Amino acid sequence: MALRVAEGEPANALQVLSAQITSLRMEGFGLMRSLALQASSGVRVYVAGADQAKRGEVLQARAGGWRYLIFDGAQSQFSGEVDAKGEDNSARFTQVSSGPFEQATFEAINRAETLDQVNNGEYELRYLKIPGVSVEAVWLHDTHGKEDLFLPLLPEHEELRGQEPISARDFIRIMQKIAEARLEFTTEP
């Protein structure tokens, strides 16, 4: 049926990003030399801590800002993020990034659109960050509550297969194992 983005995106997000990108261009930021840049729809960013991952609470990640992929032609060049503040839900620029995660995100979303589960169901596209264990993933949230799916991006952990869909149950189990090892390593004298 569908892969959709969450509602509630700040109305002025693209204007805020455009102003920031223009400012960075003026400063000579090398990535932004093209004048033909385009932005994707905003994807809601969710953030979980290593402690949350260890407890198996990845699905309770905190909703954060909105992430946009910025394109120059068919290639994702960088991403920009905004968060929404105040009663008017106005956007505030938070970061711009460039590197392999941007293209990996684009490829994972394209992959997600070909999945039978997505074509036969209804999923909300999300972006998950778990900084404490160095994991980022495209999160496909099943809006009917059946089974969320995750597509890890450039995983450094062997258990995560790059851009292959992983069920929520398996993703949580893997995150618990990784977080436990990471937290044990960082707390030992």
Image: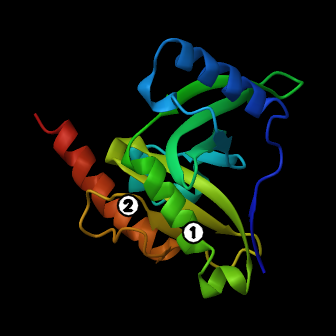
Residue to which mark 2 is pinned: 175
Residue 84 drawn at (x, y percent) = 74, 29
- Residue 110 numbered tag: 1
- Looking at the image, which is closer to me, 66 or 71? 71
Dot in front, 2 or 1: 1
Residue 121 on image: x %, y %? 74, 82
108 on left or right of 117: left
What residue lies at 38% left-to-right and 54% top-to-bottom? 54
Say whether residue 177 is left or right of residue 11. left
Place of residue 35 in the rendered image (x, y in percent of width and height, measured from the top left)? 62, 32
Q: In this rendering, does residue 128 appear at all?
A: yes
For the point 38% across and 42% down, which residue is it?
99
- Sooner in the amino-acid sequence: mark 2 or mark 1: 1
Where 114 sits versus 135, above or below? below
Residue 55 visible in the shown view: no
As drawn, is 52 to the left or to the right of 63?
left
Q: Position of residue 8 (x, y in %)?
A: 83, 43
- Residue 80 vertical position relative to residue 68 in the rendered view, above or below: above
The residues tagged by marks 2 and 1 sit, at their Cα atoms, a distance apart of 24 Å
SS label for mark 2 = helix
Along the line of sight, which residue is nearer the eye, 150 or 91? 91
What amino acid type should be assigned to the residue bearing mark 2?
Answer: Met
Q: Amino acid at mark 1?
A: Asn
- The image quarter containing residue 15 is top right
Q: Quadrant of residue 170?
A: bottom left
Q: Are marks 2 and 1 in contact (CB under 8 Å)?
A: no
Name the outermost residue toward the left: 189
